[in-house]
Image (cartoon, rainbow, N blue to C red):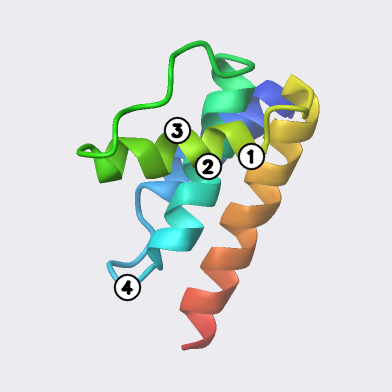
Amino acid sequence: MGLQEDFEAHAEKAKTLPENTTNESKLILYGLYKQAIVGPVNTPRPGVFYQRDRAKWDAWKAVEGKSKEEAMNDYITKVKQLQEEAASS
């Protein structure tokens, strides 16, 4: 299986993570996903009244230097880690 297919498979698996997955983990996944799909941040930072959107933008900005392949690999690794944590709890 190629990296793109593996990434897409793990993106589907991420949708089945438990409800108690932390917001921090969800933001990490969001940032890596956006970096892999879109590339560097291409929108201005949301205003202070949009805390949720701002947190998502910040998570994406935090991984801006990663290549598409690095972001995909890190995303896959993070999903696997979260699945293992959920299975062991």
> What amino acid does circle 3 point to?
Trp
Circle 2 sits on which residue? 59
> What amino acid does circle 4 point to?
Asn
As drawn, the residue found furthest toward the front would be 48
> What amino acid does circle 2 point to?
Ala
Q: Nearer the viewer, mark 2 or mark 4?
A: 2
How far separated are the C-alphas under marks 1 and 4?
A: 23 Å
Residue 67 placement: quadrant: top right
Q: Quadrant of the N terminus?
A: top right
Q: Position of residue 72 (x, y in %)?
A: 69, 33
Image vertical order of residue 26 relative to residue 72, above or below: below
Circle 1 sits on which residue? 62
Circle 4 sits on which residue? 20
Residue shown at 27%/45% (left/top)? Answer: 51
Instruction: Left or right? Give the position of 80 relative to 45.
Output: right
Residue shown at 42%/25% (left/top)? Answer: 45
Residue shown at 70%/33% (left/top)? Answer: 71
How far separated are the C-alphas under marks 3 and 1?
A: 9 Å
Label 1 SS = helix
Which one is earlier in the sequence, the residue at label 4 or at label 3? 4
Q: Residues within 10 Å of mark 2 (few under 14, many from 20)?
A: many
Circle 3 sits on which residue? 57
- Marks 3,2: beta carbons within 8 A: yes
Q: Nearer the viewer, mark 1 or mark 4?
A: 1
Q: Position of residue 87 (x, y in %)?
A: 50, 78
How far separated are the C-alphas under marks 2 and 4?
A: 19 Å
- Marks 2,1: beta carbons within 8 A: yes
Label 2 SS = helix
